[in-house]
Image (cartoon, rainbow, N blue to C red):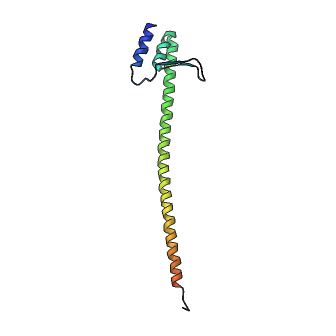
Amino acid sequence: MELTKELIQEIKLTPDVVLAYKVNKGGSYPGVWVCKDLVYYYTMWISPKFHLQVIRTFDEVTNQQKSYIGMINQLSAVFEEENNKASKAGTTLNRWKDIKREINNQIEQLKADSQLILFN
């Protein structure tokens, strides 16, 4: 028990660990949350087989998360690129509408100016 307390103190000194453990006895989500280090430590007491299963499960879940994060990052980059293209296309389309309107106005003005005037 003393060794466990010492380990918890050491974990609390680690800058990247926000919380060593938390016990929530009531509310919507009762349970105990612990950092990975304490889980590994606890599993060593049960059996070597269980300890190995826990380590492998953590590794598998972590690798899956990294894979999903990688896919999310790739899709986000594709989305951003396509969004930029769409924005440029929208800008070009709006500019074309202005140019088209101006050209049509000039054509109509030229048509009007080219009409033969019989009477003044």
Q: Residue at x 50, y 14 (%)?
A: 51
Horizontally, is 15 left or right of 53 in the view? Answer: left
Q: Where does residue 10 sit, x and y in percent of width and height?
A: 39, 16
Residue sticking out furthest to the top: 1
Q: Where does residue 8 sit, x and y in percent of width and height?
A: 43, 15
Q: Where does residue 13 sit, x and y in percent of width and height?
A: 39, 19
- Residue in the foreground of this view, choosing between 30 and 75: 30
- Residue in the foreground of this view, choosing between 42 and 116: 116
Residue sticking out furthest to the bottom: 119
* Quadrant where the C terminus is found in the figure: bottom right
Q: Residue at x 50, y 38 (%)?
A: 72
> Which quarter of the picture shows residue 24?
top right
For residue 105, above or below residue 86: below
For residue 59, above or below residue 101: above
For residue 1, above or below residue 72: above
For residue 112, above or below residue 5: below
Residue sticking out furthest to the right: 28
Q: How many marks?
A: 0
Q: Where does residue 81 sit, x and y in percent of width and height?
A: 47, 48
- Residue in the foreground of this view, choosing between 69 and 50: 69
Q: Residue at x 45, y 11 (%)?
A: 4
